[in-house]
Structures are given as C-alpha cells and as structure tokens.
Amino acid sequence: MQAFKADTSGFALDTAGLQRLFEVLAEDGYRVVGPTRRDDAIVYDEIGGITALPAGWTDRQEPGRYALERREDNAFFGYAVGPHSWKKFLFPPSETLWSAHRGDDGVMTVAVPERTADKFAFIGVRACELHAMAVQDRVFGEGPYVDTAYAARRSNAFIVAVNCAEAGGTCFCVSMETGPRATQGFDLALTELIGGDEHLFLIEAGSEAGRRILERVPHGTATTEQAEAARAVSERTASQMGRSLDTRGIKELLQDNPEHPRWDDVAARCLTCANCTMVCPTCFCSTVEDHSDLTGQNAERVRKWDSCFTMDYSYIHGGSVRTAASSRYRQWMTHKLANWIDQFGTSGCVGCGRCITWCPVGIDLTEEVAAIRAALDEGRSR
Ligand code: SF4
Ligand code: SF4
C-alpha cells in the first residue's frame, strides 16, 4: 500500500481498489449507499460492493421520459441522475417524531426516538447533488431552528463524488454553476476513465477524512496523461449540455410578474401531481400526521414529505389558499428560482433536470422561464 502524498495532481485507483474502498468504509461502520439498477431505473440503495453498481448501463432522458440502455463499455458510473436523490437518506420521506403508549394503569408514556444518526457513505454523488446538499444544509442546519436529526446524519456522512462523464438529456448544471465537475463538499472524488483494456478512476481527496480513508486503499499516482484525460472528461461533459437556464435577473423576472399569462398556459398542462417536488433534491416541504391504533393504547406523530402542489398544503381555516393549478405552479417555480434567494441567499435549483424528466407531461422549467422572459422582451420592443 502506498503512503498518501498530500500535494499531487491526483491518484489512480483500479476496480479492485474501488472494491477495497467500499470495504474500508464498511469496516469503519458506514452504511455504504450507491447507485444500483432496479425496476428499470438507477436508484440509490445500500450496496455491498462494485458488483451492485449499474455496470454497462446508461440512462436516456428527455422531458417526461426516462429509459435505461446498454452502453458499449462497462462503465460503473456511465449514467446521469435517476429518480432518487440523497435527500431520501438525510431527510427521510417518513420519520417518526414521537410515539405515545398508554399502559394498563392508564399512565401515558411519550417516547422520542433516539437520534443516533446513521453513518452513511454515499458513493457516486454528482456535482449538482453536492450543491443540493449544501442548499438543504442551509434549510435544515442554519437559522434558529436546526433539525438535529438531519444535522447529525449530515455531519456523519462520508461523500464519494463522481465527476459526470456525459451530460444527461435534461441537465443544465453549467448554467447554474453547479457542475459538471465536483469542486467542493466531498471527501473523495472520482473520475472514471474507461477505454481499451483500461478501467480506472482518478481519485482526489477533498477532506482530512477522505485522506485518511484513501491511505488504507491501494492506489497509485496518476500519470500526466491520466490527469489530462480526467480533466478532458469534465470539459467534454460541459460542452455536451443541451439545456440552459438564463438566470440573469431571474428573481425580479418572476417576482414582478405574478399575473403573467404564461402561468395559465403551464397550468393547462400541469397535472399538479407533485412529481417534480418529490424528485427535486432541494425541495423540503413536509407535513405532520398523527395516528393512533384501534386499541387507543398507542399513537405516533410522523413527519412526511409534502408538496406545494397539493391542496392540503395551503389549507388554512376556511379552505386552501392556492386552489388553482396556476397558483401552485407559480408558487413552486417562483419559490425555487426567486424567493429562495431572499430566504437562503441561493437559488433553490441546481440544474439536475429531474423535475423535467419525471414530469409526466414533460413540463420544463427552463422553457417556462424562457417563455416569460421572451414575452416581456417582446412587449418592451413594441
Ligand atoms: S428544480 Fe428541477 S432541475 Fe432544479 S434542482 Fe429541482 S429537480 Fe433539479
Ligand atoms: S409540473 Fe409536471 S411534475 Fe410538477 S406537478 Fe405539474 S405535472 Fe406534476
């Protein structure tokens, strides 16, 4: 095993080294979570080693369409992003906040689940997803009300990023300045190089924890050619990106035009199904449900993901505030791209493209913004 050298342009890992990385993380008590193929999609789940990775598969994505296809090579990370995001581990879709039990003596006992946070090692995190985690860190971890369960899971997480080698059909990370290369927020970052007989990973450490883990994984020093090939991967991916979002003045554009006719146009297509909010790696709305069992002895309060597309979400005394689809779509897009900046100092969108792919009618927020902008520009030029 080679000693780690702190100052270097990168190291190279072969597939056996990648398997060893999984094992070292498991030895240190991490639940190793990574991409795997299930139900004709690439999802994130606990995996035991490299054999669970979606080797030789890629995803083809368009508005309202997702399909897996075989690749010509056996790349482990040769896809973009699927329906899952890492928020399902850091901010679970359903979480018990407390439970209550009435004993035979009639005395009620209330218990709060112990917040011993899972130690997750996330394998294959893309640059846009690192930015999405940073966005949710501001929501859950900053301000006067810290979500302690989220904060504990987040601070325990070990992150292995992967630089995208192909742009997905719906991504627009370049225009959001969130990718395709991981530049921050990881412990280790990989760039997969595959061709001929070569299948290896350029690996760089982004934290002290990453350096310590890498010391225990057999690796070599990257050659100049390999380092250049890894840089070229990110440049090629950036140049392939077919979609962009013009963010110039976007906050004012959306906040100043709540009555724009385009909101009715998109509402005529939108099913208010909430898919876009479920797949979005930054959306964080939740609701709270109380349940009791039929004996009346046990009850619990559960937090669940919710969406601004549901009628219940804006229900207050007397009814829902946002009854029209146009008002719900406007709420979502204006919050995501404009009001989020006022609240958290950043856009709520990282350009992953999931909301476009997983919208059953293929609504594309980049097109909606462009249409509002174009209509206003046209009006000004008259
Ligand atoms: S709004 Fe859409 S493109 Fe932006 S981060 Fe959410 S899912 Fe990704
Ligand atoms: S924009 Fe698409 S995914 Fe979102 S609620 Fe409307 S139909 Fe569903």
Image: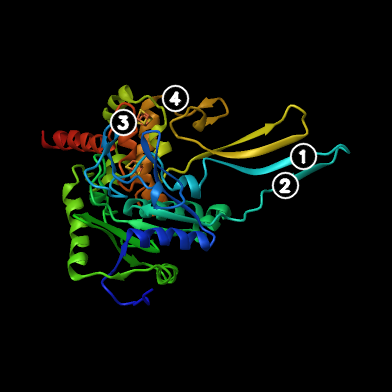
Residue 338: x %, y % from top left:
34, 45
Tag 2's secondary structure?
A: strand
Q: In the rendering, which numbered label is found on residue 323?
A: 4
Q: In the rendering, which numbered label is found on residue 259?
A: 3
Q: In the rendering, which numbered label is found on residue 101?
A: 1
Q: In the rendering, which numbered label is found on residue 111?
A: 2
- Respond yes or no on whether mark 3 lies under 8 Å from ligand 2: no
Between tags 4 and 1, which lies in front? 1
Between tags 4 and 3, which lies in front? 4
**Residue closest to the eye, 354 or 66:** 66
Please indicate, yes or no, whether residue 142 appears anywhere in the rendered image.
no
**Image marks 4 and 3: residues in contact by CB distance under 8 Å:** no
Q: CA distance from mark 1 to mark 2?
A: 8 Å
Tag 1's secondary structure?
A: strand
Q: Residue at image x 36%, y 75%?
A: 2
The amino acid marked with disc number 2 is Ala
- Residue 222 position (above or below residue 83): below
Q: Quadrant of the N terminus?
A: bottom left
Residue found farthest to the right: 105
Q: CA distance from mark 4 to mark 1?
A: 38 Å
